[in-house]
Image (cartoon, rainbow, N blue to C red):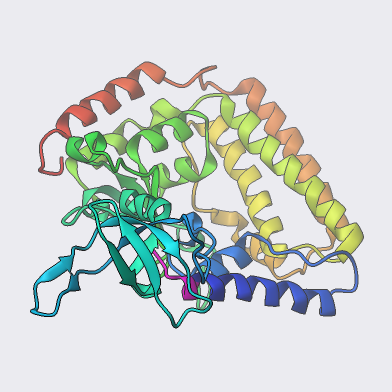
Amino acid sequence: MPGPNALVATWFAVVVELIKRSWTARAGPPRLDHHDWVALRSRAPHTACMQPPEPAILSPGTKIVTVVDLHGEHGGVRVPRGAVGTILKSPSDATHAYWVRLVEGGEVSLRRKQVVMLARYKDRELRNEPTGWSLFDRVILKVVIGSRAYGLEEAGSDTDRRGVFLPTAEQHWSLYGVPQQIDDEPAQETYWELQKLCVLGLKANPNVLECLWSPLVEHATPLGRELLAMRTAFLSRLVFQTYSGYVASQFRKIEAGMRQHGEPKWKHVMHLVRLMHAGIGVLATGEVPVHVGDHRDYLLRVRRGQIAWPDIEAVRQQLHRDFEAAAKSTSLPERPDYERVDLFLRRARRLAMDEQLP
């Protein structure tokens, strides 16, 4: 968990960025998009779960926990780390000590750096992963996604990875639990917990389907290969609603933004057009076409802002008509194969009772 200085620095960076944009933007209030937040979050790890820093001066009545052993005159531990107490008297500044009554009895003088608030201590302990646990060691599938998988990479393009991890049964049963997603932001890697991936995939989530159909598989355990072999169980006509609904809503937002701010973010526009092509391909072939193939040159021109907006809008409307036609003629089922996916997940859970990664 980042310390108060890291948290303050992160929020300060956010405020500064907003102020800068308010000076430079000619229309509308300053805004931070998803990529801005990712960049700012990377300056202080784990800020997704961060809380406001503790007050510099804790008030009388605050329950605290000692974070260090306090030694007596002869070197023995007088107050052990983890002792709980209540502040009786607070100093007027951060350089002086608190007078604290301990639950175990007795009163003691403590400095601010020697204590934390009890409520924060509990939250921090529950967020700490037990020693020896690394969910990144439980990855069963790792693939490359993004521009390199799409065939849209250029000089300097990043390499983004996604995948799946399977926690052990012990990790699931523990007090600490497991997150639905783990991220290594510096390495640009994201992994879903297996059940989370299954749920998203059954809803035809494009990110999950692209992960399962990526042509660039870097790592797969036997269970990971089994997941890839059954990936068609996730496909259904829901692809039309998910893909086309998302694209339509995003184009409406882009058009509203253009009325206020001028040009859109062309990279985002490019990916929306790409997603329409991919969705049509899913319905037509029963597979998820990740690589853009012959659409590469056109999509790169869109990303560079070389296609006029009216022409892009005309292409979007035509693609939507093609999408509707594909939805009427597709051989995909009305619903994905929930039963097959459920059986796979439950078998994976049973395998997770063994410490060895399946």
Which quarter of the figure is the N terminus placed in?
Answer: bottom left
In the image, taking residue 325 as reference, residue 311 lies left or right, namely right
Which of 183 and 123 lies nearest the eye of the viewer? 123
Point out residue 113 in the picture as x, y percentages from the top left corner: 36, 74
Q: Quadrant for residue 161, please give it.
A: bottom left
Which quarter of the figure is the C terminus placed in?
Answer: top left
Residue visible at 41% across and 49% down? 214
Residue visible at 40% across and 38% down? 197
Q: Specify the farthest residue to the bottom.
A: 95
Point out residue 263 in the picture as x, y percentages from the top left corner: 83, 66
Q: Is 311 located above or below residue 98 in the figure?
A: above
Residue visible at 67% across and 40% down? 246
Task: Give the magenta part as a residue range.
Answer: 1-6
Residue 207 in view of the camera: yes
Q: Quadrant for residue 226, please give it.
A: top left
Q: Specify the farthest residue to the front.
A: 106
Q: Is 338 located above or below residue 218 in the figure?
A: above
Point out residue 338 in the picture as x, y percentages from the top left corner: 41, 19
How many numbered marks are there?
0
Point out residue 88 in the picture as x, y percentages from the top left corner: 43, 61
Q: Is 186 located above or below residue 171 in the figure?
A: below
Residue 35 falls within the magenta-colored stretch: no
